[in-house]
Amino acid sequence: MINVQFAALPARWDTYREPLKRAFAEAGLTVDMRQDHPADQVDYVVYAPNSDLQDFTPYTRCKAVLNLWAGVEKIVGNQTLTMPLCRMVDPGLTAGMVEWVSGHVLRYHLDIDRSIAMQDRWEPVVPPLAFERPVTVLGLGALGSACAQSLARIGFPVTGWSRSAKEIDGITCLHGDDGLKQALSEAEIVILLLPDTPATNNILNADTLAMLPKGARIINPGRGPLIDDAALLEALDSGQVGHATLDVFRVEPLPADDPYWAHPNVTVTPHIAAETRASTASQVIAENIRRGEAGEPFLHLVDRSLGY
């Protein structure tokens, strides 16, 4: 019998209980999954960082903590978490992110907002074709790579930037400080899909925003701290940035008095770009437990030194 502790808010238990049971059965695992196992009898923890569990010291038998979220910034620095930590790379979440990002890129590319605003007059404006609209994706992990490849299939010339060197078919891949300058200087649309780490905090700031072509658009479904908010607002006011669509923020929910709400060149969405789907995420959890029991490497293991 494999003892699995489900450590998340109560609503998550209601959402995940049956999908996880099905996934365990399909994987051939005999699992006793509860919310209240004695800590020293737990083999795996299925985990959300906003749960009450913050001290992992009593979990002496635990083989891995399996995160329900793609982001691990709220838990990766926990000094009591000494066992392997796996982040969630969920096919359903990836598909949702690709759809959301593609939709907002096309919204900018086709100038759909302008068309909607001109319902009372006939002023045709023909957009360029996709191959004439350079797009840059900052972050080439699972989500960034999937979005970059999807946009390239539509026809956009896509440049991807990451901290370390990557190779992705059909994508111009850059890295390092010089690569970041090049990636931004050519981008009419920039998509942020980097993790939240000390190295990526405020990666879009006054200096890097000035590298963009005037009027560039920004889409951030990644992490709020990737953007220096004051610098972005200044760039929006000056016209250096034409518009920003923001799905994530340093404080969530976004406070009612935040200037983003009222800015005419900002679209706020309430952290909806991608959500972990219980059905597909449960299969990832089950596969990692199967791997742990078989002595195989875990999927999506977090590198503590990098923070993701």
Image (spheres, rainbow, N blue to C red):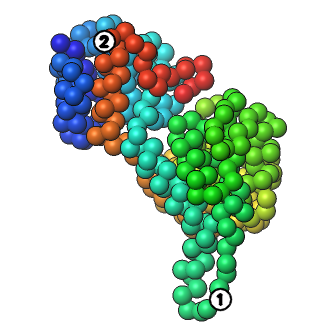
Residue positioned 44% across, 34% down in the render:
89
Left or right, residue 304 beside residue 21: right
Residue positioned 69% across, 54% down in the render:
157
Between discs 1 and 2, the one toward the N terminus: 1
- Observer-nearest residue: 59 or 30? 30
Q: Position of residue 173 (x, y in %)?
A: 70, 39
Left or right, residue 206 beside residue 59: right
Disc 1 marks which residue?
Answer: 123
Q: Position of residue 2 (x, y in %)?
A: 22, 14
- Observer-nearest residue: 59 or 4? 4
How packed is label 2: few (under 14 Cα within 10 Å), some, or many (20 or more)?
few
Q: Quadrant of the C terminus?
A: top right
Identify which amino acid the numbered label 2 is placed on: Glu
Disc 2 marks which residue?
Answer: 293
Whole-angstrom CA distance, mark 1 to mark 2, is 64 Å
Residue 57, compared with residue 177, is above or below; it is: above
Left or right, residue 18 beside residue 279: left
Q: Position of residue 32 (x, y in %)?
A: 17, 20
Q: Position of residue 254 (x, y in %)?
A: 49, 54
Residue 235, compared with residue 227, is above or below; it is: below
Disc 2 is placed on an element classified as: helix
Residue positioned 61% across, 66% down in the render:
108
Q: Quadrant of residue 59?
A: top left
Q: Note whether residue 228 is visible.
A: no
